[in-house]
């Protein structure tokens, strides 16, 4: 598990194994638009301000993934204990 922080509100939530960032945020009324929910379409693409992304999508190129500035929170996760999203 890891924590996800919404920069604009300062809210932090725990993301357990088996749940996506999108699912956890939706449970708290923060809706990120999704379509495929499998890391293919890029609809959920979100900026990342802090933390190391565990990319699990096929949407971003390896170069884009290496920049560590945006992620697909429908499936991608955090490598470290916390991640801060530009929401
Ligand atoms: Fe399609 Fe996240 S909803 S990549």
Image (tube, rainbow, N blue to C red):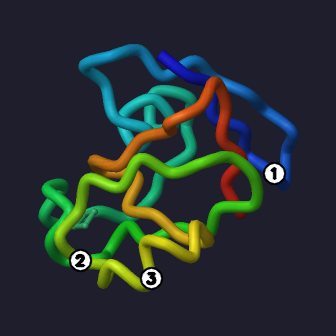
Mark 3 vs mark 1: which is more N-terminal? 1
The answer to which image quadrant residue 39 occupies is: bottom left
The answer to whether 40 is drawn above or below residue 11 in the figure is below
Residue sitting nearer the eye, 70 or 34: 70
Residue named by callout 1:
7
How far is the residue under mark 2 from the one under mark 1? 24 Å
Front position among marks 2 and 1? 2
Residue named by callout 2:
59
The answer to whether 17 is drawn above or below residue 48 in the figure is above
Which residue is painted at 17% across and 70% down in the image?
58
Query: Quick one: quadrant of the C terminus?
Result: bottom right
How far is the residue under mark 3 from the one under mark 1? 22 Å
Q: Is residue 1 left or right of residue 23?
A: right
Front position among marks 3 and 1? 3
Residue 64: assigned label? 3
Front position among marks 2 and 3? 3
Mark 3 burial class by Cα count in 10 Å: few <14, some 14-19, many 20+: few
Image location (x, y in percent) of residue 73: 40, 52
Which residue is painted at 42% across and 41% down in the image?
77
């Amino acid at each position: 598990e890891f924590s996800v922080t919404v920069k604009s509100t300062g809210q932090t939530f725990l993301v357990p194994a088996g749940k996506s960032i999108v699912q956890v945020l939706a449970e708290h009324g923060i809706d990120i638009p999704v379509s495929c929910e499998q890391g293919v379409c890029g609809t959920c693409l979100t900026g990342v301000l802090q933390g190391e992304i565990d990319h699990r999508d096929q949407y971003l190129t390896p170069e884009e993934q290496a920049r560590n500035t945006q992620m697909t929170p429908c499936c991608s996760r955090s490598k470290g204990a916390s991640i801060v999203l530009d929401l």
